[in-house]
Image (cartoon, rainbow, N blue to C red):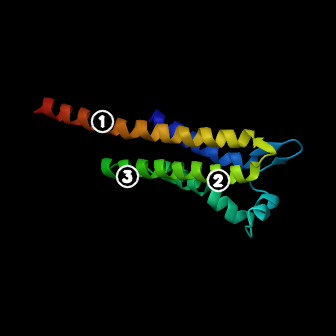
Amino acid sequence: MKYKNILIGTTILGLVTFLLPVVTGRDMSLAPMSRAVASYLRLPSPVILFILWYGAFSIALILSLVNIKSIIFSRIRFVIIILLNIYAIAVHLAITSELIGRTGALGFGGIIYYLSAVANIFVCILLFKDGEINIKKEIDSHKSDS
């Protein structure tokens, strides 16, 4: 259960990074959800940018809040969350590398975004393995009852 709380916390932290500057430079500090970033990336609206950039964290948060009793579906959920976080890292890398160019550096929000995605992947792997341990414990307890 403690891993699930870590998963929820890091996912929320990853979502909150849209308020923090993702790219900082000599004289600039860009928050990811600004009209300037959306127009630079040739997107019609910052809402589309939010869906592309933070949609994976939004879906991962919803999946982490759902309580699934089936071990098979629970493992499928963890695999989906891992894939969503890999997607989040890829999108974040593509967008920030485009924004950084040669003048900027990764901002505080960008660093937290990467750390949140990596932490989610690590926690999902632990939860995936923890489910296997619980199966063995349940099988062992049923054997001792017989």
Crowd class of label 2 (few under 14; some 14 to 19; many from 20; radius 10 Å): few
Point out the image quarter for the N terminus. Answer: top left
- Pick the residue in front: 87 or 137: 87
Badge 2 element? helix
Of the numbered discs 1 and 3, the one sitting upstream in the chain is: 3
Where is residue 29? Give x, y as percent. 83, 46
* Residue at image coords 49%, 41%: 121
For the residues bearing labels 3 and 2, Cβ distance under 8 angstroms? no
- Pick the residue in front: 90 or 128: 90
Please identify, in this view, whether the residue under mark 1 or under mark 2 is nearer the observer.
Answer: 2
Indicate which disc residue 76 carries.
Answer: 3
Badge 3 element? helix
Of the numbered discs 1 and 2, the one sitting upstream in the chain is: 2
In this rendering, does residue 128 appear at all? yes
Please identify, in this view, whether the residue under mark 3 or under mark 2 is nearer the observer.
Answer: 2
Where is residue 95? Give x, y as percent. 68, 54
